[in-house]
Amino acid sequence: MTERLITTTGIAWRTFFTALLLMTLISASGYNLAKAHEGHDHGAKPPALPESTAPRLALQSDVYQLVAILRDGDLTIFLDRTSDNSPVSDAKVSLAIGDATLDAKPLADGAYLLEGGPFRKAGQYEIVVTIAAASGDDLLIGSLTIPEARATATPGKSDDANTPSLASIPGWSYALGIFVAGVLAGLLLCGGRKTAVASALILICAATLIPPSASAASLTGEIPRRLEDGSLFVPKPTQRLLDVRTTVVKTSSVQPGLRLIGRIIADPNRSGLVQSVNGGRISAPAGGLPKLGQTVKKGDVVAEVEPPIATGDYSDLAERSGEIDQQIALAEAKIGRFERLITTNAVAQSSLDDAKVELDGLKRRKAAIRSTQREREVLRAPVDGVISAASATPGQVVEARDVLFQVIAPSSFWVEALAFDPRNADGITGGHAVLEGGKALKLTFQGKGRALQQHATQLQFALETAENLSIGLPVTVLAQRDKTVTGKVLPREAVVRGANGETLVFEHLEPERFMPRLVRVEPVDGQSVLVLGGVEEGARVVVRSAEMLNQVR
């Protein structure tokens, strides 16, 4: 009985020490259950920034946005225009702090620096900022709060540089410590080898639920991040680096776009095909066959075609040639007799003239037969341009109407689009062709077909500018119609795709805070979209570097 009591008491003590060990590990890992929801606010107040963020003053008016960041007792000031978020580098910035007025000096990067301010001690400082610039004067009022820790320590560093923290412990060391702790816990509980190993594995699995301390990089606080309400905190230095720009949403009248499928075709007025009329065997001209991309002039010889003649045709031509030779000999003999007799007036002059005419006709017939046997068909460039397609090889036998070369003007292209709904083919006035990379080229409407092609109406547009395009290149045509609608128009770059495929824009709420907004849009042209819902008039929306903000997590 006494031995059983001693065993029970030992297990209880081992259990106590094991629990104490686990609590120590959890506390050392920085896992604080009481602070799991710290900073969460269910009201309309914007979420607070992390404590690791450097003390800052963020002010905004209808004209300017100002962000002042405290580093080592000095204020770095960023001044931007509220309308488009562009930096203001030519202003005079003065700060009234208590009874003192201090001027900030401009920096080379467009920011301003206030040195020697009274920000070495913790507390709340009321600041009045006076701004004088060419774009307008303004007065901003706010307060800068410096906590006790920030007044005694450099932002981003520990209070004691010689004191190690778990943030500096590598991940493998952290896992090894948990493993050793698990083995010790198993030995304390039961003392058995198998039980110790099992306990160690259980504790390793439990350790995966305990997050390690944040890395030193995340403690700086000056990196973009997503806040609790889904908005983005983007420090002003990062905005300057990304060149973030905004615009004010306004209502205007536009012509909505119609999205069609199209392809690049040659300008029919400045292009042409090289074909053989009769067919035959290809022969290269004196300068050789032209190469792809070679420039040619109208009338340049690009190839020669030797006409095909069958064996039976050769026999017929030889027979006809012999008959003509016989008739030529008789005609020449007749002319000789007439010339001798004409001196005696035995033959009239008209008979001699008729004989000469007959001889000339026989000689022309002989020349025609010879040309049929030897003359080649000469193929010439129909227009000025470059060779865009070539399918001719010396010795190649081609049929009549085979396309051997295509000549196009490299600066003149058209676009052919298909409208599967006949109602969409009416009232087209112009549009834009959007290439694969997003580049938009302006189109001029040329006309529409009256016969269906692939069950669709054929539309043709002329490209106003064409560079480095190829025949057959697929494009997206945003055709404009003659009707006008009123709505909110934004640049195409302002609209991005979210992680789930939704359409988003980023509204600039505060100097360093952006809120993603779900919107419905339809295309207007290659540069703009019409916003049907999701953003209000007067809101400031990011129109440059929105795709970069979309990567912030």
Image (cartoon, rainbow, N blue to C red):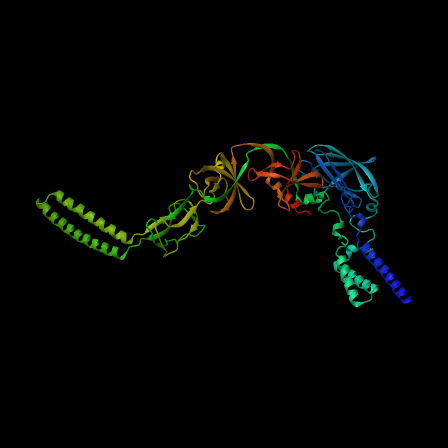
Please say if 246 is above or below 361: above
Label count reads 0
In front here: 7 or 437?
7
Residue 525 lies in quadrant: top right
- The outermost residue toward the right is 2
Q: Please state the horizontal and vertical placement of residue 57, each as a whole percent of the image.
A: 77, 40
Residue 352: x and y in percent read 14, 45
Residue 40 visible, this angle: yes
Q: Residue at x 42, y 48 (%)?
A: 406
**Residue at horizontal 50%, vertical 43%?**
261
Q: Residue at x 70, y 38 (%)?
A: 509
Left or right of residue 332, residue 392 in this image? right
Image spot of residue 536 (x, y percent) = 65, 34
Q: Depth check: 337 or 165 in front? A: 165
Q: Which quarter shows the N terminus?
A: bottom right
Q: Nearer the viewer, residue 334 or 238?
A: 238
Asked if residue 89 shows in the view, the reply is no
- Of all residues, the one furthest to the front in this rendering is 1
- Front residue (pair 203, 374): 203
At which x and y percent is residue 355? 15, 46
Residue sitting at 23 percent across and 56 percent down? 315
Q: Viewed as shown, does residue 242 lie left or right of 125?
A: left
